[in-house]
Image (tube, rainbow, N blue to C red):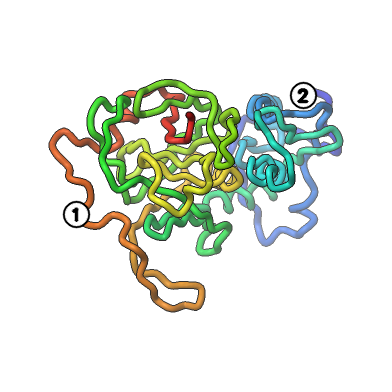
């Protein structure tokens, strides 16, 4: 990476430090002029995207006068999100393209440039990241990405089934309902290994809604800790978007591939998460409506041998992601 900076301002050899506060309101010019532009010399495929970012961050480190992080770099280059979203299997299929292995798609191309924000812009972006939060209402099958009180994205999701099931991963009966509460994102798994929680078999392929098989896509899975507990209910992409708007998972919160990229982009480790169960909500016209009770009080009959899904989080490898996608 050395020697490829363009339009660089003078660097500093001082150690990493927090993004400094700026007195007064910065001008647009102060915000827009980047510290550096890094040209992309060769195509970068999805399978190499995260290692590429890691190498770049190690090279840049604190030379702009603050510690450059992955969330800061991504926020400074919003066009990257558009590229990632465009790799969605169903979006490509709608355009007549079948993608067997999403990892082979190119997301960074020669001629692209990555902007390294200056200290002023980095401070403003850091404030935006600090204000970002995830709000989920289970019976609405809705995840909202918020910046303060401003809505960034409203995302249709699927949630845990209203049943109990034997899962080999937990070695007992498991309550599959998605748990409510408050917490934060504690882990972003960028290279997941996929386990079927029913039989603990690793798999690499999935059966799509169009009944064709593809390799599992490489999209980060986010793990929230809720109420101080790792329930194992991850936020992740589903390769079967027909299940969105339904109780269809083993406790996880599923989104389309495109929306899973959006969640990754906006919600790094430390992002606050709230999972609610509110049946009375306002519709688009501001009228109060009552949603269907997806987890009625009678629910699945639980016994002393039935455990919450967090048992899985305690027993599987750190890189494991348990998945209920169609595999056969």
- Nearest to N terminus: mark 1 or mark 2: 2
Q: Which residue is mark 1?
A: 298
Q: Residue at x 42, y 54 (%)?
A: 136
Task: Out of 324 and 180, give the one closest to the viewer.
Answer: 324
Q: Secondary structure at mark 1?
A: loop
Question: Which numbered tag is attached to residue 1?
Answer: 2
- Does 74 sit left or right of 310 as displayed? right
Are discs 1 and 2 less than 8 Å apart at CB?
no
Residue 321 rendering spot, x and y as whole percentages: 44, 30
Residue 202 rendering spot, x and y as whole percentages: 45, 21
Question: Which numbered tag is attached to residue 223?
Answer: none
In the picture, residue 314 is in which quadrant? top left
Q: Residue at x 54, y 58 (%)?
A: 154
Q: Residues within 10 Å of mark 1 (few under 14, many from 20)?
A: few
Residue lying farthest front? 211
Work out how far the residue at label 1 is from the one at label 2, CA to CA, in angstroms.
60 Å
């Amino acid at each position: 990476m050395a020697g490829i900076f363009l339009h660089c301002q003078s660097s500093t050899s001082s150690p990493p430090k927090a993004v400094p506060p700026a007195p007064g309101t910065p001008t647009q010019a102060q915000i827009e002029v980047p510290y550096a532009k890094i040209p992309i010399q060769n195509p970068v495929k999805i399978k190499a995207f995260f290692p590429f970012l890691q190498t770049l961050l190690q090279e840049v480190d604190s030379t702009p006068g603050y510690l450059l992080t992955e969330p800061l770099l991504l926020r400074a280059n919003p066009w990257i999100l558009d590229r990632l979203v465009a790799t969605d299997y169903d979006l490509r299929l709608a355009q007549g393209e079948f993608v067997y292995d999403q990892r082979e798609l190119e997301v960074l191309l020669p001629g692209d440039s990555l902007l390294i924000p200056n200290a002023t812009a980095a401070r403003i972006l850091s404030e935006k990241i600090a204000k970002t939060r995830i709000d989920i209402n289970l019976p609405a099958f809705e995840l909202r990405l918020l910046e303060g009180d401003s809505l960034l994205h409203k995302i249709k999701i699927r949630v845990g089934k209203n049943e109990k099931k034997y899962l080999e991963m937990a070695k007992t009966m498991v309550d599959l309902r998605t748990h409510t509460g408050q917490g934060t994102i504690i882990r972003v798994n960028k290279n997941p290994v996929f386990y079927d929680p029913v039989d603990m078999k690793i798999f690499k392929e999935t059966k799509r809604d169009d009944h064709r098989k593809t390799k599992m896509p490489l999209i980060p899975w986010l793990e929230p800790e809720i109420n101080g507990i790792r329930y194992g209910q991850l936020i992740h992409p589903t390769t079967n978007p027909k299940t969105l708007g339904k109780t269809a998972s083993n406790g996880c919160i599923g989104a389309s591939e495109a929306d899973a990229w959006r969640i990754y982009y906006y919600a790094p480790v430390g992002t606050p998460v709230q999972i609610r169960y509110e049946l009375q909500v306002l519709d688009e016209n501001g009228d109060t409506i009552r949603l269907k009770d997806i987890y009625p009080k009678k629910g699945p009959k639980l016994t002393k041998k039935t455990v919450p899904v967090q048992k899985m989080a305690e027993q599987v490898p750190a890189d494991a992601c348990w998945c209920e996608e169609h595999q056969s």
